[in-house]
Amino acid sequence: MESVGSIILYTIVALAMVVFSVLAVTTRKILRAATYLLFTLFAAACVYFMLDYEFLGAVQIAVYAGGIVVLFVFSILLTTHPGRNSEPLASKSRVLGAVASVAMLLVAGYALVSRCALFVAKPALETPTMQQIGESMMSTSEGGYLLPFEAISVLLLACIIGGVVIARKR
Amino acid sequence: MDATLPILILAIPLGMFLVLGLAGCKMSHKLAGTLGCLGMGTTLVLAYYTAFTYFFSGSPEFVDAAGNRLQALIFNQTWLAFTDNLVIRLGFLLDPISAMMLVVITTISFMVHLYSMGYMRDHHGVYEHGFQRFYAFLSLFSFSMLGLVVATNIFQMYIFWELVGASSYLLIGFYYVKPSAVSASKKAFIVTRFADLGFLIGILILSYYTGTFNFTELTSAPVEGLAGVFQISESTAAGVKSVFESSATPVFMGASVLTWALVLIFMGGMGKSAMLPLHIWLPDAMEGPTPVSALIHAATMVVAGVYLVARLFPLYLMEVSALEFVTWVGALTALYAAIVACTQIDIKRVLAFSTISQIAFMMVSLGVARPEMHEGLGYMASMFHLFTHAMFKALLFLGAGALIHAIGSNDYTEMHGLRKYMPITHWTFLIGCLAIAGIIPFSGFFSKDEILSSCLGNSTVIYVWMSLVAGLTAFYMFRLYYLIFWWKEHKVHEGHHAPHDQPWTMSLPLIILAAISLVAGFIPFGKFVTWNGKSYDFMAHFDWSVAAVSLFVAVVAIAIATVMYRKENPLPEKMRAAMPGLWKWAHHRFYWDELYMFITHRIIFDGICRPIAWFDRHIIDGTMDAFATITNKASRAIKPLQSGQVQLYVWWYLLGALALGGITMLCLL
Amino acid sequence: MEIKAIMLLVPALIMFCCGVYGFITRRNMIAILISLELMLNAVDINFAVFNRYLWPDAMEGMFFTLFAIAIAAAETALAIAIIINLYRSAKNIDVRDLNKLKY
């Protein structure tokens, strides 16, 4: 049995997630879309906190909200004339897209709902500490993630170089 | 006889062709011309030596104890051995006619080489463009023609036959920037190639039945005790005939297969020797430089057809119908060409038709020759006339070349009254005209008289016919002579210097040829060239009544020409007005060219080629085009699927995923 | 009342469908990228939720999410570099107009 507070929090988070994602893809002002994305990301971070993955929530806020959205905003400011709306979408493609998305929602939703295991309650859990996370990140034994960690670091390096090469003025 | 010198006779012109053709553009004009003349001069000496050895050495390989001249295979190299039976050889056959032809070809060729040194440059001494190329082609021609006459087998002859055709094509089209020269060269090539098709089929028939290409196996028998020496033998030819007669199909469409083969082979000769109806290329071939006309289209290449018939003469004897065919083709051509020659304005064309007419004389002479009459006098007469005609016709052409060189036109209306300005040309040309007209003691008189004698021996109709043609010959030659050198005073145009005689390089050949034309008639030809090698004194067959008649005809013809053309007078116009139809037809060469144009363009092109082209373009190509169009349309239609837009791909992916999800859902329900 | 797994998964699913809708309808490349981030986040939430509800003792889902965030950051940075470069040469980032090199 959850506390009333967490129920309210859940309601707010779920509503924010749904409403802001819908708004992010339907608004015609691209800067607003980025802002709505930011709110959605915050909502996702809240979900992580609710699941007791505090580190994950912190990363979500730091990397997504702090890094990526800022990148988005910068690039939007660099590539669009301020105040100009993107052209309205053709209603045909909007309707088609909406139909496809709703169809997908129905199919996937049915698949979700028809699985009883998904209705289990949240089991109790000790929040994983930073030490646990750090050790398994550096560990090479079972449940260790050293190799992906290193792979990601190489990927990030490659990404930095690639970004520099692409964006460099010739 | 050692094979070195004969091989050199062929090798020097070939080498000269390669040297001048490959390195000519690096040489000065003078060096190229001198080299060409030196090469040909050497060949001339070698050929004279070879012929002299053949006729006068009395060596047992050349003449037997009874005084019969033999055929000697100097060498006979196997070139292509397809099967045991089908072997193609290249070699050098020395017999009376090939030895005589060596002399004729090298003489005329050397004269033309020398003459061209002067002719192929303008009045300021500047050499013409392509001078070295010209000498290279002349050498190629000389090589091919020499190879043709010494051929040991009919296939070698065919090879060189095509080579002379190719070099003739190259030389007619020497001025390749002139459209008329280009079309003339193409015409000559195509017409003779068409004739050579018949020749090739004839060769194939003959060799299929007899299993051999060699002349010596077709017409002669080996002489005992001497390797490579043969004697003309009627029994060998009769053996060939019996091979044909004992075959499965001795008769084809009313004539024996041997006749067919011989007539088809003769068709090649008709093409090369410009017999009716394949004569149309020769007048146009006059587009080439005049020395070329003298060498190829008067003296040597065009008599290849006569030479071919003479070479296979024992076989022709076996089929009298083939010989009669030769006779009548020759007789018709002779008359036709003589009539046309009376109306032409271009002096080279007059000479061209005269050439056709004279070659037809030789053909007729071969056609009427029978061993039982005057010991085959016609054969000897034909070769004799070939010899003398080569000399005086080359002389006439070279003289015409000198006139054209001096005046700059082929048209006699530009000439008139040149006798004072160009005395050497005038006198040599007059000698040529007298020789061709058959006035005693010029060479043409003797050879033509032999021909007429043998005609009389065969049939009176032919005799009268040919005498008439001989009279026409004298008439049109003197018409030409008077119109060039007399008629009226020559008008020297303002700003032009008066025409004058040519440099020594051009005069010398004229004088030499004139001298030969003057005395060649006294050569006792019967001692040297007879159909079976048996020597005889042809004066024994000399019919003084025939000689008197022909002389009378010639003199009368010359007299008529003199009356009509010596001074300017209205008689020719009256003549023309008196028979306008005949004149018009003759002037347009009896519309042969137009007939060919009609057949090729209207019937073959329009009637056959165009429908075929239509079929090809619309049905064959259309099918292929349809495939291409369908592929094109299909790819255009499916191109948008590969738009390169990821969103579209996502659409498709989404649809697929939804479909799969839907199906899964239905299954689970 | 308890918060069950499904209650978190359904908003994530809606988020994902919004991402799909945005991806296939938007023309601005940055908007497309934003839609992509939405989808990615929805998937991330799924990872975390399944991990937490079904195998609370393991941490695989959490780590997957962690790495996905890192990769998303890298991918976004690179994509934005490309977009800016494109904008510099074409003065436009509308995917409909960027067809000069097509076919």
Image (cartoon, rainbow, N blue to C red):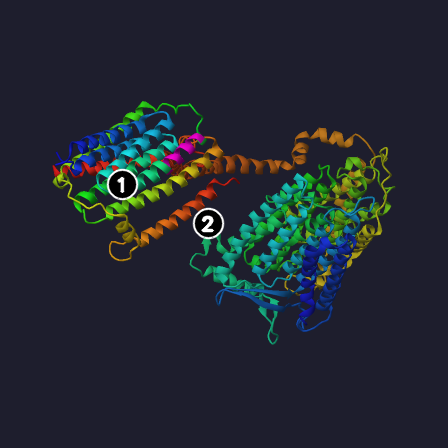
Residue identifier under label 2: B253
Seen in the picture, residue B499 relative to B154 is either above or below; the reply is above
Seen in the picture, residue B68 relative to B392 is either above or below; the reply is below
Which one is nearer the viewer's eye here, B195 or B549? B195
Mark 1 → mark 2, Cα distance in angstroms: 100 Å
Residue segment shown in magenta: A67-77
Residue identifier under label 1: C44
In the rendered structure, does residue C48 fall within the stretch colored magenta?
no
Q: Which quadrant holds residue A106?
A: top left
Quadrant where the N terminus of chain B lies? bottom right
Seen in the picture, residue B529 relative to C83 is either above or below; the reply is below
- Whether callout 1 and callout 2 share a subunit is answered no
To which chain does the residue with label 2 belong? B
Tell me: B118 left or right of A56. right
Q: Nearer the viewer, mark 1 or mark 2?
A: 1
x%, y% of residue A95? 28, 25
Q: Secondary structure at mark 1?
A: helix
Q: Secondary structure at mark 2?
A: loop
Q: Amino acid at mark 1?
A: Asp
x%, y% of residue B336? 65, 41
Q: Is residue C102 visible?
A: no
In the rendered structure, does residue A70 fall within the stretch colored magenta?
yes
x%, y% of residue B164? 64, 53
